[in-house]
Image (cartoon, rainbow, N blue to C red):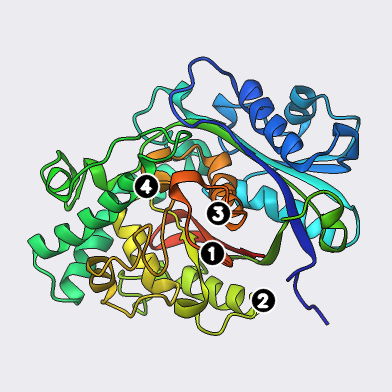
Amino acid sequence: MAEGICDKVAIIGMGCTRFGERWDAGPEDLMIEAFVEALHDAGLEKKDIQAAWFGSCFDEVNVGKSGVPLSLALKLPFIPVTRVENFCATGAEALRGAVYAVAAGAYDVCLALGVEKLKDTGYGGLPEFSQVLGTRNRLIFPNITAPGGFAMMATRYFAKYGLSADEGKEILAMVSAKSHANGAKNPKAHLRREVTVDQIKKAPMIAWPLGLFDCCGVSDGAAAAIVCRADMAKQFRKDPVRVKAMQIALSSGEELYTSHWDGTYVKSAVECAARAYKEAGINNPRQEISMMEVHDCFSITELVTYEDLGISERGKAGNDLRDGFYNLHGKIPCQPDGGLKCFGHPIGASGLRMMYEMYKQLQGKAGDRQIKDPTIGLTHNMGGFPSMNLISINIVGL
């Protein structure tokens, strides 16, 4: 009978580039930058890696559909390299492949690396979605945009829970202000300036009620992880981080084609969280989770995710924000590194970048952002729209 991967695999090395407008570097340079840090962190040599998983979403601006670019850039010694793509969970998907391969006993040591060079596209946001879904997307979703789709979630949330426009926008602004305060402490973040709630509320509107500071930016970056069997991890370092759960859930279509879903939550996130908690042996996430990195593509996404993960009660996440529950020194800090809001979202790298923060925090190596005595970290990626999406949730601990 299947028993999951809890405590079978450990992360023994991670690397992460500085995210931003990296005009100085191509995707190969970014891959090398993240890999060299991970290899040094693990105390390994290149020859110790037995297989690799490579995450990259947009072929047009990156390096094609195969694993060859990773092998060439890193000069890997003729080992298997698998290229993966799964929308905004692409980096997490690369890590899942490496972890599952080790848990299955196929390899002892594997690499996961994700990269994206989005500033080269010339778009202010993500490249047009028909590039990803094919020309068919123009017929199904001819006018949809990511800000528009999530703005509708925000207005529906306000209506369901009786929030006035001012109250709702105040809560959303608190989400972003928190993340900017954290990102200002992070030398690898793209945006490193604190922003006040008042500034956020007065910013130019993108798709009401989402203003400029409610939306994450676009950037370049790469991140990498080296994993091994948990029973051999302390051969490499004294403070490995154990993988407790890795789950992915995709929309079935019922949100879009039935009347069961009311638009104020992400059903696949609820299902994914339940499976992840079961795999990790977590019974009360509000009490047991130490910290989180969630997919804050928009401030409303983060707000709803608090509730989808079972941390805040439905309709009460705003109360927790006001109480400082998700602040850096609150009960469950969320986005301690600044999140997508401060890093931007180079899709292939984001999931691994989130894990990099959990890894450093658990080892007590997060500098000015260090959380006191964390034991369990959770990362959450969302790809797609509120009504049609995929969710990746990973849990790690000491």
The label shown at residue 361 is 3
Left or right: residue 212 compared with residue 392: left
The label shown at residue 373 is 1
Q: Which residue is mark 4?
A: 182
Asked whether residue 148 appears in the rendered view, the answer is no
Amino acid of disc 3: Gln
Q: CA distance from mark 3 to mark 4?
A: 13 Å
Residue at x 59%, y 80% (from the top left corner): 282
SS state under label 2: helix
The label shown at residue 2 is none
| Label 1 or label 3, whichever comes before in sequence order | 3
Outermost residue toward the top in this view: 24
**Disc 3: CA contacts within 10 A as few (<14), some (14-19) or many (>=20):** many
| Label 1 or label 4, whichever comes before in sequence order | 4
Is residue 35 placed above or below 196 in the rendered structure?
above
Q: CA distance from mark 2 to mark 3?
A: 22 Å
SS state under label 4: helix
Q: Nearer the viewer, mark 2 or mark 3?
A: 3
Amino acid of disc 4: Asn
Q: Position of residue 12 (x, y in %)?
A: 75, 50
Residue at x 35%, y 64% (from the top left corner): 326
Q: Nearer the viewer, mark 1 or mark 2?
A: 1
Quadrant of res 394: bottom right
Quadrant of res 363: bottom right
**Disc 1: CA contacts within 10 A as few (<14), some (14-19) or many (>=20):** few
Asked whether residue 358 appears in the rendered view, the answer is yes
**Disc 2: CA contacts within 10 A as few (<14), some (14-19) or many (>=20):** some
| Label 2 or label 3, whichever comes before in sequence order | 2
